[in-house]
Image (cartoon, rainbow, N blue to C red):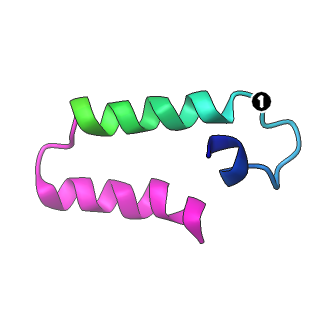
Amino acid sequence: MGTQLVAHREGCHGAAGWIVRVVLALLFWPADDQAAEQRLLERFIAPGFD
């Protein structure tokens, strides 16, 4: 999945590992509140799915 998400970029090695690290960070170190979490997801995660 990680390689598919960034396959359009040349030289993106380790993409799958990066995706796993992001997901684990979201699960184990959430933002201070729900609104902050939403802002982080919209700014940094959602653009990867556009």
Going by the image, does 44 lie left or right of 3? left
Horizontal and vertical percent for residue 33?
11, 51
x 36%, y 57%: residue? 41
Horizontal and vertical percent for residue 49?
57, 65
Going by the image, does 15 lie left or right of 38? right
Pick the quarter of the image with the C terminus.
bottom right
Depicted 24 relative to depicted 26: above or below: above
Residue 12: name its quadrant.
top right
Residue to which mark 1 is pinned: 13
Residue 23: name its quadrant.
top left
Going by the image, does 32 lie left or right of 37? left
x 44%, y 60%: residue? 43
Q: How many marks?
A: 1
Whether 44 is among the magenta residues is yes
Asked which secondary structure carries label 1, the reply is loop
Segment colored magenta: 29-50
In the image, farthest residue toward the left = 33
The residue lying toward the viewer, choosing from 16 and 47, is: 16
x 47%, y 55%: residue? 45
Question: What amino acid is labelled 1 in the image?
Answer: His
